[in-house]
Image (cartoon, rainbow, N blue to C red):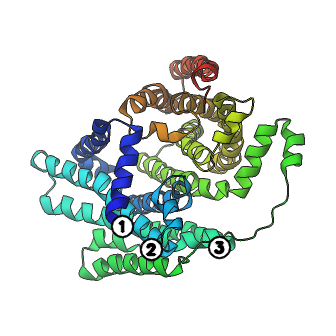
Amino acid sequence: MLKYYLIEEYRRHIYVAKKYSLFLFPAYIVFFTVLGAFSVQDVFQIYPYKPLIRLIMMSMFLYGFGVGSYELLGRSREHYNLINTSTILPVDSRTSYLMLFLRDAIYYTILFMVPTYVGFLISVPFTTLELYQVSFFSLTLTLSMLFGYAVAYATFPFAHIYKNIYNSILLAIFIYLPLQYFNILPFPPAELQIQKTPFWFVLSTVPILLFSAFGYLCTPREFRDVSRKYRNRLKMYHSRFKDILLAKEMEDIIRGGIIIKALLTYFFPVVIIFVFLNMINTAMRSDVYNALSHAIMLSIFSTVIYSWLTIMDPVEYLAILPLTSGDLIKTHIKAYFILVILIAIPILVILDFNAALLLVPATGMFCLNTLYLLSMTANLAGHRMNSMLFNPGIIMKFVIYSIVPGIILVIASFELNFVTIGVMLATAIFMVIITAYNLKKIKTKWIYF
C-alpha cells in the first residue's frame, strides 16, 4: 500500500506540472541552502546561537505540523485519490491513514531535507563548516520536521470526532512553543543540536514514535459522520453581505473550521517571523523593522489562506448554474480578505501599539499588498491552488510580480525619508494598476470550471 501511496503523490505532482518541474524544486532548495551556508558566520555574529537554534527548530516543527495537518485535514478529502477509494475496499481507515502519514513523512523528507543536506555538503569545501556540523544540523532539522508530522498525525482524529479537544491541543502547542523559545521548557531536537548528547537524541526520537503510535491507535477503523448542529447562518450572512455566493462561502468557512486551519498555516508561522524580526531589532539596537515592515510581512504570508478556501469543496456543480469560474474566484477573494483582516489587523495593532502614527499607513499598506498578492495568485492559479504547485513558470511569475514589490516596500520602510516614501508611493501605484489588471483579466481567463 505504501508503495502505491508514494506513486500517487509523485503522479499528483507530475499532473500539475511537467516532469522536469518537479526536479527543479529540489534544485531551488540546494541553491538557497548553499547561499545560506555562505552567510552563516555573519548570522551568528548578529544572533545568539541558542535562541536562533530554538527558533529554527520551532519553525521546522511548525512546518511539519502544518504540512501534516494540511494533508490529513484538507487535501486528503479531495476526490479520486487512494485515501477515499480505500473506503470502498476491504481496508480500514486506520491502515489507510497510517499509509498517508508514512507517505508524507517519506516523500517530503526526500523532497526537502535531502536537497537541504546536499546543499550543505556542496558548501563545505568553500566555507568554515565541517562535514559533521552540517550532517548533525540536517539530522536535527529532520527530527524537528518529523516531530511536527507525528503530532499532526496524533491529533487529526480529534478534529473529526472531538473538535473541542483538538482546539485545546492547538492552544497547548501555541503556549508550549514560546515557552521552549525562552528556554522555560525544552524542545528535544533543539536541545540535541545545542548539547549533542545521546540523552537528547533519545528524547527527540522516542516522542516521534510514541505520537505516531498514538495517532494510529486513535484513528477510527471507520470514519463516520459525527452529528453536529450548526445554526443556519446563510440568511444572516446574505442580509449582511448582499451577496449569496459570499454568504455561502462565509458559512462554509465556519462549518469547515477554516479559521482554525488558518491559525495553523498563517498565525503560528507569522508569530515565529515576528520573533525573528524582534531578534534583528534587538541585535541592531534600533527598530529596523517597524509597523510598515510588519504589515508587508503579514500580507506576504497571508496567501496561504487562499489555498484553504479553494481546496476543500468540490465546486464543479456550480458549472450548471449561470456562473463562471471567475465569479467563484471573486467570491474567494472577498471571503479571503475578510478572514485575513480579522486575523492580521489585531496582530499588527498589538505588535505596534506604541507606534500609533504608523498604524494607519501600515494598515493601508497591508490591505493594498494583500489585495495585490491575492489578485496575482487568483489570476495565475484560478479557483484552485493545485495548478500553481511545482510549476516553475507560474512560480517565477508569482515571484517577479508578487515578492519583488514586497521586498522593495520592506527595504524602503527601514528608513523613512523623502526618497524612500517616494519609492513606496511609486510601488503602491504600480501595485494598484496591476491589481486592477488582474481583477479584469480573471473575467476572461477563468470562465470554465
Which one is in front in this view, the residue at disc 3 or the one at disc 2? 2
Query: Mark 1 sits on what residue?
Result: 1
Q: Earlier in the sequence, mark 1 or mark 3?
A: 1
Secondary element under disc 3, as helix, strand or loop, is helix
Q: Earlier in the sequence, mark 3 or mark 2?
A: 2
Residue 54 locus on image (x, y percent): 39, 64
Determine which of the numbered discs, if any, sits on residue 161 in the image: 3
Q: Is residue 373 visible?
A: yes
Q: Earlier in the sequence, mark 2 or mark 1?
A: 1
The residue at the far left in this view is 125
For label 3, count other residues whose C-alpha is less than 10 Å away and answer few (under 14), some (14-19) or many (20+). some
Which one is in front in this view, the residue at disc 1 or the one at disc 3? 1
Residue closest to the eye, 262 or 86? 86
| Badge 2 vs badge 1, beta-carbon distance below 8 Å | yes
Distance from the alpha carbon under mark 2 to that under mark 1: 9 Å
Residue 435 locus on image (x, y percent): 60, 22
Image side of residue 237 versus residue 415, left or right: right
Residue 374 locus on image (x, y percent): 59, 33
Tell me which amino acid carries mark 3: Ile
The residue at the far front in this view is 89
Tell me which amino acid carries mark 2: Thr
Q: Is residue 289 visible?
A: no
Tell me which amino acid carries mark 1: Met
Query: Mark 2 sits on what residue?
Result: 95
- Please, is residue 81 above or below residue 393 in the view? below
Secondary element under disc 1, as helix, strand or loop, is loop
The residue sitting at 66% across, 51% down in the picture is 350
Residue closest to the eye, 402 or 318? 318
Image side of residue 258 versus residue 266, left or right: right
Distance from the alpha carbon under mark 1 to that under mark 3: 26 Å
Image side of residue 323 versus residue 98, left or right: right
For label 1, count other residues whose C-alpha is less than 10 Å away and answer few (under 14), some (14-19) or many (20+). few
